[in-house]
Image (cartoon, coloured by chain):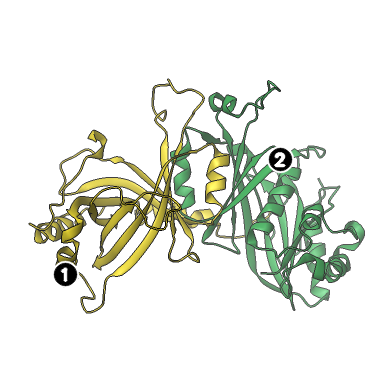
Amino acid sequence: MSINLSVQSVLDSIESAQKNDIVPDQEFVLQGSVMDLSVSVLLSRLRGLCDNADSLPETFHDQEICFILKDFSNPGAVGPGTGGVMLRVRKALDHPELPWQLRYTGQPEVGNRPALLRNCLDVPVSSNICDFLHELGAKVDHEYVSKGYIMRKGRIKVTVFKIFKVGGKEVQEGVTKSHVVELSALTTRVDEAIATDLRIVADQLKPLVNLQNLDYRRL
Amino acid sequence: MGVTVLQTFPDAFRYGYKEVEKLHTRIAHLGAQPNGVFQVDCDTYYMNQQNSQFNDIPGSGSTVNKKLHILHNTETPASTYAIIESPGKQVTLCADLMFDLLLPRLSHMYTAKKNLKVETKGTRFTVSDFIVKIGSVSMSSGQYKGILVEVEYLACSVPALCWPILREFLQSFMGFCVSSQPPPYLQARFQQVQGPQDTMQQYLEKFNEFRESSAYPVTGSLSASQPGTTSTSTPS
């Protein structure tokens, strides 16, 4: 007894987007690090390279909580999916009005590419996401605060940030004496041209920082 | 965002579209203007069996299978609502539509039960400060389940302040199937500001009722009539 109404369901739009390969669910990444003392030099170089060179780089101050969703009742299990899925929740401490972000990053893809390629999904969510993930069965793995600068060069996102421990102390304690430098670009399944652009920018930053295709599975 | 009330319109003889048309006529007498179509759908994922022991209730020896409901509403087309349901607790997450693409990655923990997919679709009307959506509820198999009417009063966000006018409006075209008491969901949040997630939670409650209702025979189909044309269906 259904009625034939031509309603375009919400689901149709995401399915057709996926079918047409326009969902930006792949990410190219290059990472490196620079000592705290040299950050200002690197920032000057980046300001010259990136868009909007006349304005100061935008700052960010985020907290990231990493959850692992897996079958915790069976720690000895082997097989696909038993390692669990890592879901990262990120909130902007300096902009509490912004939606929280849920991020999934997959394993790095195998293959010889100029930059590391991995599957990723960014989903803006409501602020009860931590409660939701706990109910879903996920557990907190680790959390940290990152504070730094973000710049753009076309489609490339450039971040320079320092990682701090989470705590109620007035003076935040850095995890290391260096800053992380990351170049990343979101792309679709079929478009891999951006990886070369990423490599070109990375080469222009030498010798201040050596950005590499880091296979963090070996760490 | 105003206050939304969902009301099941009784259709004991399963006339389906005839009853929907009746409601369309009645609401037209109140000056309602048809304003497009709408759809709300709900998919349900179950926690995989091998993981459910993880949810043992201490001392009871029984296991709980958590349910993850994924809902979409054409009124908020860029959002996905994920509702996790476990005994005594329900958490509603409002997320971007990209959340749907995340679900296949959770397949090691949650699997969809395709035959449980339920949706309501129909015509959307506006009557001054009210939005009325008269929907026909069906399962993914096409099995007709009933009629669900959504009424939203745009001018107010707190149920306690507008229940009398909502009740009067609902009764004006649906008669006395509308109780004079607010629905339990609203009663529990009578003084709180309502948001889109409240609408979705009410939809989930109603969908669960429809899924569980097996009082009616499953046979019968309704001819596919478009709004505005005369229905030629006969009672099944």
Give the answer, above or below, for where A30 lies relative to A85: below
Q: Which residue lies at the image location 49% right of the left edge and 56% below the top edge?
A: B97
Local packing at callout 2 (Cα closer than 10 Å; few below 14, some 14-19, many 20+) is few
Q: Is A190 positioned to the left or the right of B52 in the image?
A: left
The percent coordinates of residue A126 (x first, y second) are: 54, 57
The chain ID associated with circle 2 is: B
Locate the C terminus of chain A by quadrant.
top left
- Chain B as rendered: colour: green
The mark found on residue B88 in the picture is 2
Residue sitting at x 46%, y 55%: A14
Task: Tell me the amino acid under the disc marked 2.
Answer: Gly
Horizontal side, residue B116 vs residue A57: left or right = right
Residue that extends furthest to the left in the rendered view of this protein: A207
Residue B229 can be seen, yes or no: no
Q: Residues within 10 Å of mark 1 (few under 14, many from 20)?
A: few
User: Looking at the picture, does residue A71 appear above or below residue A188?
Assistant: above
Horizontal and vertical percent for residue B10? Answer: 84, 52
Amino acid carrying label 1: it is: Ser
Between B17 and A52, the one nearer to me in the picture: A52
Colour used to depict chain A in the structure image: yellow
- Residue at (76% x, 58% y) in the render: B189
